[in-house]
Image (cartoon, rainbow, N blue to C red):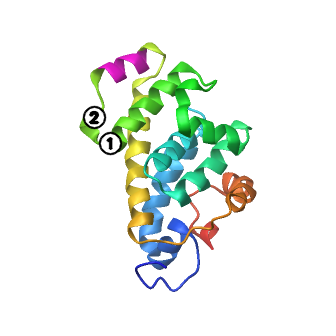
Amino acid sequence: MPYNKLNNELPGIRALMEFRPETAIPLNALAELLLRDDDNTLTRGERELIATYVSYLNDCFFCQNAHGALAQYYLQCDMDFIDKVKENYLNMPLGQKIKALLSIAESVTKGGKEVSRDQITIAKNEGASDREIHDTVLIAAFFNMCNRYVDGLNTLAVPNRQYYIERAEMRAKEGYAHFDLYK
């Protein structure tokens, strides 16, 4: 049961955006820019994977499943693969650059000052650009905030992961910029 009376039965951040639509606009604009902008050298799948991993580290059921479903859609894999990445990305068949970026995202989740110069050097040595490193840190920071927003108000989450998987294609096509997708 959500801590606040939200006057809707929507899951996760969608309930909060319906409750305070004026906050939905800038949050969705930032999500759209970070996760879907085509002027980015990280794929949408890689960016959603970073969001999923951070949400997993924060134990945010709604976010890790909603964004995990999008990651699996974009990466054209199944949720078992996404689950294994969350559990131990170092042992998964991912490129070294995305592994280095996931390491940075993990450090941001612990605290911004946890990111080390060595991690940045490793990411750059694996081909990550300054912008990719910047965007990884910002995606991680943004999802740390979103996870705390969703869980801090104890929003509802549909417990059936298939719910998120079935909506991934629609969400991928509609994006984040349009608030009405949350209705």
Residue 84 position within the rendered picture, expressed as x and y whole percent measured from the top left? 61, 37
Residue 99 falls within the magenta-colored stretch: no
Q: Residue furthest left?
A: 113
Query: Label 2: how many residues lie within 10 Å, few (<14), some (14-19) or many (20+)?
Result: some
In this figure, what is the number of numbered marks? 2
* Secondary structure mainly formed by the magenta segment: helix
Indicate the amino acid at tag 1: Lys
Secondary element under disc 2, as helix, strand or loop, is helix
Relative side of 157 to 123, left or right: right
Q: Relative to 50, is 91 above or below?
A: above
Indicate the amino acid at tag 2: Glu
Residue 119 position within the rendered picture, expressed as x and y whole percent measured from the top left? 35, 23
Residue found at x 36% / y 43%: 109
Residue found at x 38% / y 60%: 148
Name the quadrant of the C terminus.
bottom right
Q: Nearer the viewer, residue 14 or 23?
A: 14
Please state the extent of the stretch shown in magenta in the rendering: 118-124
Q: Relative to 109, is 12 above or below?
A: below
Query: Label 1: how many residues lie within 10 Å, few (<14), some (14-19) or many (20+)?
Result: some
Residue 7 position within the rendered picture, expressed as x and y whole percent measured from the top left? 51, 86
Secondary element under disc 1, as helix, strand or loop, is helix
Q: Nearer the viewer, residue 157 or 44?
A: 157
Among the 4 quarters of the image, the one containing residue 147 = bottom left
Q: Which residue is mark 1?
A: 110
- Work out whether residue 40 can be spotted: no
Q: Which residue is mark 2?
A: 114
